């Protein structure tokens, strides 16, 4: 019955409409063993953290606002090693009874279909994080030798001056022949 924030783990099954009318704030972590769908897509580096405030908005809607966070390891598409990505999603959910209600929502809200019974909060949080996982991920730093990249890019665009001497091609030719000659 308390409206104070709890810092332990987030409960899985809740009654969100009741929480909104009671002005409840939930913050805490979710054990990764409970997030099967998320774990099958990426591996978690840190536990999922959520901070959600349930309240009634000015227009009488039951809403939940806050954030969900996680750190996952996904494959870098440049070097194929693992790269850690931080997921940090701002959440603004408005509870609706069904899909028809959804259409009447102001655009700032994401609909959350909630009946009178308990709902699975974990699956809602999981959904949110799955959307945040980058489809294609790279290391922030240049994880493959820069010179390899530069030469392949310039090779591909080397159509401009076939007529006169192309200093780049000359240099490349020189480099190639020098590589063949044993020292
Ligand atoms: Zn990489």
Image (cartoon, grey):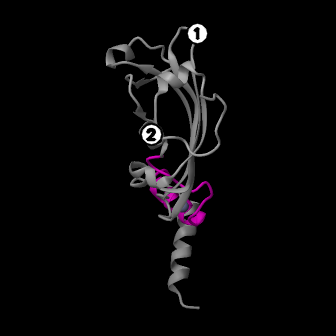
Left or right of residue 18: residue 145: right
Mark 2 against mark 1, which lies toward the viewer? 1
Question: Whereabouts is ligand 1, in terms of quadrant?
Answer: bottom right
Label 1, on which residue? Answer: 58
| Magenta-drawn segment | 134-160
Image point (33%, 19%), residue name: 99
- Counting from the top left corner in percent of width and height, residue 130 is at 44, 43
Q: Residue at x 46, y 28 (%)?
A: 15
Q: Residue 116: say if magenta.
A: no
Kindly identify the residue that appears in the image at 56 percent across and 74 percent down. Answer: 175
The residue indicated by pointer 2 is 131
The image shows residue 96, relative to residue 38, as above or below, that is above
Q: In this view, does 41 lie above or below 21?
A: below
Name which of mark 2 and mark 1 comes first in the sequence: 1
* Tally of marks: 2
* Dot 1: element: loop
């Amino acid at each position: 019955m308390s409206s104070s924030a709890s810092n332990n783990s987030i409960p899985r099954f809740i009654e969100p409409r009741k929480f909104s009318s009671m002005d409840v704030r939930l913050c805490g972590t979710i054990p990764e063993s409970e997030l099967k769908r998320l774990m099958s897509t990426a591996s978690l580096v840190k536990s999922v953290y959520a901070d959600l405030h349930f309240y009634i908005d000015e227009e009488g809607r039951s809403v939940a606002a806050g954030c969900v966070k996680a750190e996952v390891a996904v494959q870098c598409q440049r070097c194929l090693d693992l790269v850690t990505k931080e997921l940090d999603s701002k959440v603004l959910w408005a509870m609706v009874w069904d899909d028809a209600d959804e259409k009447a929502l102001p655009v700032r809200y994401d609909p959350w279909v909630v009946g009178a019974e308990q709902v699975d909060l974990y699956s809602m949080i999981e959904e949110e994080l799955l959307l945040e996982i980058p489809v294609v991920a790279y290391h922030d730093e240049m994880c493959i030798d820069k010179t390899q990249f530069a030469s392949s890019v310039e090779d591909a665009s080397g159509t401009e001056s076939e007529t006169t001497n192309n200093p780049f091609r000359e240099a490349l030719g020189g480099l190639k022949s020098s590589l063949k000659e044993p020292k």
